[in-house]
Image (cartoon, rainbow, N blue to C red):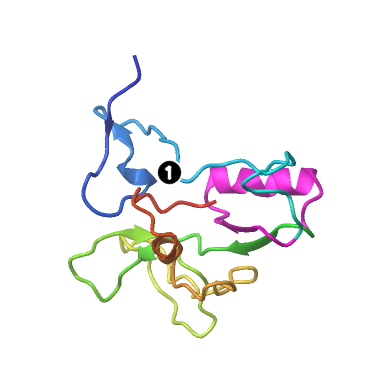
Amino acid sequence: KPPTIMQSTTGPRTALDEKGKNGEYIRTDQGWRDVISQENGAKFPPQSGRYHLFVAYACPWAHRTLIVRALKGLESAISVTVVHPVWKKTRPNDDNDVHNGWVFGDPKGEPFASTNGLGGPFPAAFPGNEPDPINNSFCIRDIYDLAKDTHGKYSVP
């Protein structure tokens, strides 16, 4: 019998909301999942430059996509943007929105502490942690909003 997952049912959520009754971490599948295929009429055919990964070095699931990308020799075909490894509020001007998540680098930004106040100050950007080059988004949540996501789990990759 699969474990019962206690998920937030209101508003945005993170992987930290995915826990069982005893507090154990239970990863649920991402709402956005599909396959790149060479079959005729494929929804997502392989094409150099068509795909872009948003990853966090702090996320083991995102990190493995970088490993597979390298092992398959796809570095020149699939571009990458690395988000900041420390979460920040994704709606900093909305006191009622408490979601914290992956943000893009801000070379002109100020150093900051983590959302729980521990550690830091962390630099606003570091080498490889650049602003979003495609949508100029502040955070990963913004990209999900652009895609009209209704799942509410803002994850990388």
Is residue 1 magenta-colored?
Answer: no
Q: Residue furthest bottom?
A: 108
Query: Around disc 1, counting alpha carbons within 10 Å, would you say few (fewer than 14), some (14 to 19), or many (20 or more)?
Result: few
The part of the chain drawn in magenta is: 49-75
Q: Which residue appears at 19% of the width and 70% of the height?
A: 95
Residue 124, image x and y in percent? 49, 75
63 or 121: nearer the eye?
A: 63
Q: Amino acid at mark 1?
A: Gly
* Depicted 6 relative to depicted 65: above or below: above
Q: Residue furthest front?
A: 41
Q: Quadrant of residue 16?
A: top left
In the image: residue 10, left or right of residue 55: left
In the image: residue 64, left or right of residue 99: right
In the image: residue 54, left or right of residue 139: right
Residue 89, image x and y in percent? 33, 66
In the image: residue 93, left or right of residue 62: left
Q: Which residue is mark 1?
A: 31
119 or 60: nearer the eye?
A: 60
